[in-house]
Amino acid sequence: MEDIKRLEEKLAHYEKDNEELKLRVEELTDFFENASIPLHWVDEKGIIIWANQAELDALGYEKEEYIGFPISDFHADQEIIQDILTRLINNETLLDYSASLKCKDGSIKHVLINSNVLRKDGKFVHTRCFTRDITEKKLEEQRKNDFVAMVSHELNTPLTAISSYTQLLIKNTKQDDGFNFQALTKIHTQVKKMTSMIHDFLNVARMEDGKIQLNKETFELHPLIEEIAGDAQLLSAKHTVKLIDCEAIAVYADREKIGQVLMNLISNAVKYSPNGGMITIGCKRQQEKVSIFVSDEGVGISKADQKKLFERFYRAHNAKIKTVAGFGIGLYLVSEILRQHDSQIQVESQEDVGSTFHFDLDIRVNVKK
């Protein structure tokens, strides 16, 4: 009888625990169902298996129009959804992953996805996705990019005329006519700086709008770098530009944009070496790749600044360069152009010693001298 009594007590205890567990599950389900943040679960086949009311309201669907359907039906970019599913199946956590969702009324909603994977006994069960609407922010960025593109275009027209007339005057001015020749040369240099800055703004706007395209070709590095080094020497009389041999090396890339990258790096080297010194631009062959670098003897970059250096509009915090003009888009543009070339900008720097920026490109052809 005592054994039966103990069994009955245990059974009553288990029933109580089970009721408490059911209550907690119901409370948790109710919390997710009524959460103000849009939520949805997706299985390993990419099928939506659950969504809360906030998710349905955000996109305008009824449950029977959304749950049970492939998540790809609701993504505007099919390449992105395939990337998302691949990452999640490989147990990656998504943090602020940018995507575009199709609403029932045909409009597009831009969101950031945060998601992780629920696994049981090591097996994929489903993903848990949280979305945050950034549509208004995206539209504001688009309006800003359109404005920048319009203003840049309008500024570029008169600057082109000024540059042409200045070149004509320089051509007709003798070098021994000291002041006039030097003044015209400086005007031309400043016009080129402004033109380069405008092109940077235009390229950033186009890049963020997805309209920038690469025009790849096979070309020799040495003539391009020699050309860039020659232009760079005009930027400052206090600096000496040294070119390290890049002959017999050719790459397959967008020549104009790689030139932009190098000009940006050299312009920065000049700006952030206010006391002058040597600026070196060159190449190092590394088996099937070539490492292209620009180094200076300037103020250097702190470890903290190096982490954010390639973010848009970021400028290093250094009292020695607080008077240096700039908008913080040059290095951001450099990193984006190189990313489109499957490359990456790297920096090595020490404060009060100098900096070296370098990146790799695949060697396409070995050109004989």
Image (cartoon, rainbow, N blue to C red):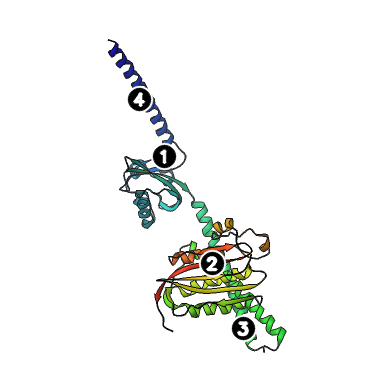
Classed neighbour count for the residue bearing mark 4: other residues with Cα under 10 Å, few (<14), some (14–19), many (≥20): few
CB-based contact (under 8 Å), mark 2 and mark 3: no
Q: Which mark is residue 53?
A: 1
> Which is more foreground, mark 1 or mark 4?
4
Determine the secondary structure under disc 2: strand
> Which is more foreground, mark 4 or mark 2?
2
Quarter of the C terminus within the rendering = bottom left
Q: Quadrant of residue 354?
A: bottom right
Q: Which residue is mark 4?
A: 18
Residue 188, percent from left and from top: 63, 79
Classed neighbour count for the residue bearing mark 1: other residues with Cα under 10 Å, few (<14), some (14–19), many (≥20): many
In the rendered structure, which amino acid carries the disc numbered 1? Gln
Quarter of the N terminus within the rendering = top left
Determine the secondary structure under disc 1: helix
Q: Which mark is residue 167?
A: 3
Would residue 180 be visible to someone looking at this image? Answer: yes
Classed neighbour count for the residue bearing mark 3: other residues with Cα under 10 Å, few (<14), some (14–19), many (≥20): some
CA separation in Å, label 2 and label 1: 50 Å
Would residue 264 be visible to someone looking at this image? Answer: no
For the point 58% across and 57% down, the residue is 303
Which of marks 1 and 2 precedes in the sequence?
1
Which of marks 3 and 2 precedes in the sequence?
3
Which of marks 2 and 4 precedes in the sequence?
4
CA separation in Å, label 3 and label 4: 87 Å
CA separation in Å, label 1 and label 3: 66 Å
> Which is more foreground, mark 2 or mark 3?
2
Relative to 294, residue 20 above or below: above
